[in-house]
Image: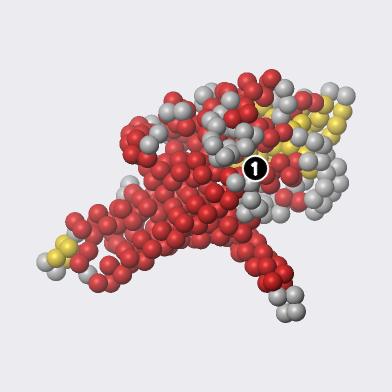
Amino acid sequence: MQTETLAAFAHNAAHRVEQEVGEDAQARCALALVAEAGLLTHTVPARWGGASHPGVDESAVSVRILCSLRNVLSFASGMLDVMFVEQGLGSYPLALGGQGEWVREVLAEVMRGERVAAFALTETGAGSDLSAVATHAQHDADGWRLSGSKTFITNAGIADFYTVLARTSGQPGEREGLSMFFVPADQGGLQVERFEVMAPHPIGTLTFEDVRVEPQWLLGTLGGGLELALATLGRFRTSVAAAANGFSRRALHESMAHLERRQQFGRPLSSFQGLRFDLAEMDARLAAGELLVREAAEAIDQGMEASTEVARAKWWCTENASWICDRAVQHLGGLGVQRGQVVERLYREVRALRIYEGTSEVQKLILAKNALERHRKENPLG
């Protein structure tokens, strides 16, 4: 789609999603709409029937396209955005490590929105540090038996399958011994407990009680699960920054529209110098974020090592989105905190972006580490 066509689609789709009653109904509606528009083909590599993009390896998805789509979808609707990207996050380990015709069938259903995917990494004691994963898989004559729990799992309760990081050897705290598994949601012993977060979002905790996992559902190599998880996050993390930019752009749009309409002391609020200073900073911060996303996405698609570029984009854009949305709420005054106002929704939706797929603090640790390494390399004598 051209950008204008995509924006029109997202606007209309957001309206349709809002007509649904209940979080799950909205999530399923959003998924059906992005699937019908063909957008989910960009969440699956061309090797498995997904969209192909010049210059991008057929075993990977295009980060530039993911970012472009999330930027537009998040401007219109947080639910459209999350249901789009979760199909990619949840299925990408399968695309990277799955073998056999059954993988192609599952991924085809992912692209058609017929199977809902979910990515299950986080545990109560394992968030930023995935080496602390304690959920374990015991090998037996029939394959594997999975026991443990995962929490803060998007699409918990509506997913048709989960890609699960579990320990197949060693102890929590060791980076070795982690493997990735495909686990259908209807396997016996898998239980889901939903909870609510600040913004509408299907999410919950998974409990695995001796869940049987077929031998072919081991993804990649035994003990290679951490690499699969990090490869997935490395491909999708920049798109979190792009979504943050979409939310920021919508907040700036809503703020300017209000300041142009609202009259105080006989003139529009947009004529007051202090508020103009705010708008100028919001615009410049957003432009900087968009440049950082472009730099990171292009580097990844070109096969470059881009940990610094990705960390910069993820940290700056998500922190900046909270700042811009906060200013938009302030500009609307009392209306800004009224439930049902767009800026009030945005204020709640952007907060989680600073936490998931690598907290702001983790991104700064990466940036500092890489900066020090560059300094030592360029200045060996100090």
**Left or right of 209, for residue 299:** left
For mark 1, give the secondary structure: helix
Residue type at the position of mark 1: Thr
> Which residue does the image show at 45% across and 55% down from the upper left?
290
- Which residue is most to the front? 55
Q: Position of residue 237 (x, y in %)?
A: 58, 49
Left or right: residue 26 compared with residue 51: left
**Where on the picture, by quarter, is residue 30?**
top left
Of residues 315 and 48, the one drawn nearer to the viewer in this rendering: 48
The quarter of the picture where the N terminus appears is top left
Kindly identify the residue that appears in the image at 86 percent across and 46 percent down.
Answer: 170
Above or below residue 381? Residue 172 is above
- Could one spot residue 326 in this view of the protein? no
Q: Is residue 254 visible?
A: yes
**Residue shown at the point (33%, 56%) measured from the top left:** 252
Above or below, 133 against 10 in this view is: below
Crowding at dot 1, Cα within 10 Å, few <14 / some 14-19 / many 20+, comes out as many
Outermost residue on the right side: it is: 141
Q: In percent of the image, x 33 and y 49: which residue is there?
A: 342
Residue 374 location, quadrant:
bottom right
> Where residue 5 sits in the image (x, y, percent)?
34, 35
Residue wearing tag 1: 232
* Front position in the image: 149 or 356: 356
Q: In the current view of this chain or complex, which residue is farthest to the bottom? A: 382
Comparing 54 with 119, the one in front is 54
- Image vertical order of residue 161 relative to residue 148, above or below: above
In this rendered view, identify the residue nearer to me: 142 or 59: 59
Q: Position of residue 295 (x, y in %)?
A: 52, 54
Residue 107: horizontal and vertical position, in percent? 60, 26
